[in-house]
Image (cartoon, helix red, strand yellow):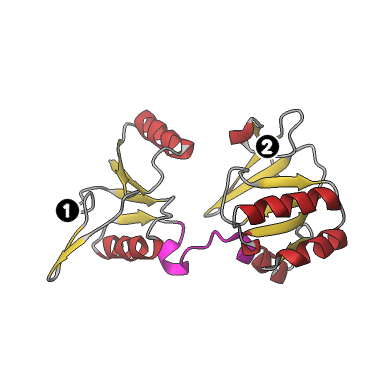
Amino acid sequence: MKITLVTTLTELSEHKRLKEECASLGYDFEIIDLSTFGYFIDEKLLDIEGLNNLKTDLVIVRGIFNAINTISTITEHLRKKGIKVFDNNLTSLKYSIDKVNDLVKLSLAGVEVPKTCYTRDWEKFPDLAQRIGYPVIIKSTRTGKGASVYKIDSPSELSEFISDLKSQEKEAKGYLIQEFVPYKFDLRVLIIGENLFTMRRIPKEGEFRANFSLGGSVELFDLD
């Protein structure tokens, strides 16, 4: 069996793990790097390096942050050609990892989430943070793995933080304000079909973020 990973982020640790698991199962594995995605169209012939005459049993699509709409179209085309594609519903539901939108979806579904504010105006941040109550978390809407997540303990610290972001010409729409929830560990729950898998993530000493990429420890957890 041959498995092909299509991505624009080839160096992610998750991709290395996929390669290791494929090797342990005796599967052939390849990565198609679309980080410099481009194409050439000659009349009706579409030429995309790496995807022309693709011969594989399964395509996994993840981390395609460059040209996402176009790659989604190509992914759907591969599926129509009879190639099995795992893309986390990318083509049927479009790209769904959107922190701003995800929290709205959870709230509308009646799922309790930390107090959260979103605004496109820096001037509203102090009042909103005060409404949530310090300390607050300021989180980028565009990053993962704990990157650009900050704990702000006071109004003066927030003022300094906003001034710094403004000097970098950052826009308020790129950040969320959230309630800080003290915790000993958090749970990452994956639902695959009828199966449920849970990982407990424990922050390292002196760190408020539990991400494994930031030194947190992880272990399996039995969720009730």
Counting residues from the N terminus, which is met first, the one under dot 1 or under dot 2?
1
- Left or right position of 81 against 218: left
Choose top left, top right, bottom left or bottom right for residue 24.
Answer: top left
In the foreground, 219 or 43: 43
Q: Name the residue under label 1.
A: 53
User: Is residue 224 shown in magenta?
Assistant: no
Choose top left, top right, bottom left or bottom right for residue 187.
Answer: top right
Residue 16 lies, in percent from the top left, at 42, 34
Choose top left, top right, bottom left or bottom right for residue 73.
Answer: bottom left
Looking at numbered disc 2 in the image, what kind of residue is underneath it? Arg
Specify few, some or many for label 1: CA neighbours under 10 Å numbering under 14, 14-19, or 20 or more: few
Tell me the number on the disc at residue 90: none
Q: Name the residue under label 2.
A: 201
In the foreground, 141 or 21: 141
Disc 1 on helix, strand or loop? loop
> How many numbered circles are shown?
2
User: Is residue 89 shown in magenta?
Assistant: yes
Looking at numbered disc 1 in the image, what kind of residue is underneath it? Asn
Instruction: State how far apart marks 1 and 2 are (Cα).
Output: 42 Å
- Left or right position of 144 against 127: left
Q: What stretch is highlighted in magenta?
A: 88-101
Residue 102 lies, in percent from the top left, at 62, 63
Residue 4 lies, in percent from the top left, at 31, 45
In the foreground, 158 or 104: 158
Query: Mark 1 touching mark 2, by CB under 8 A?
Result: no
Residue at x 27% of width, y 48% of height: 57
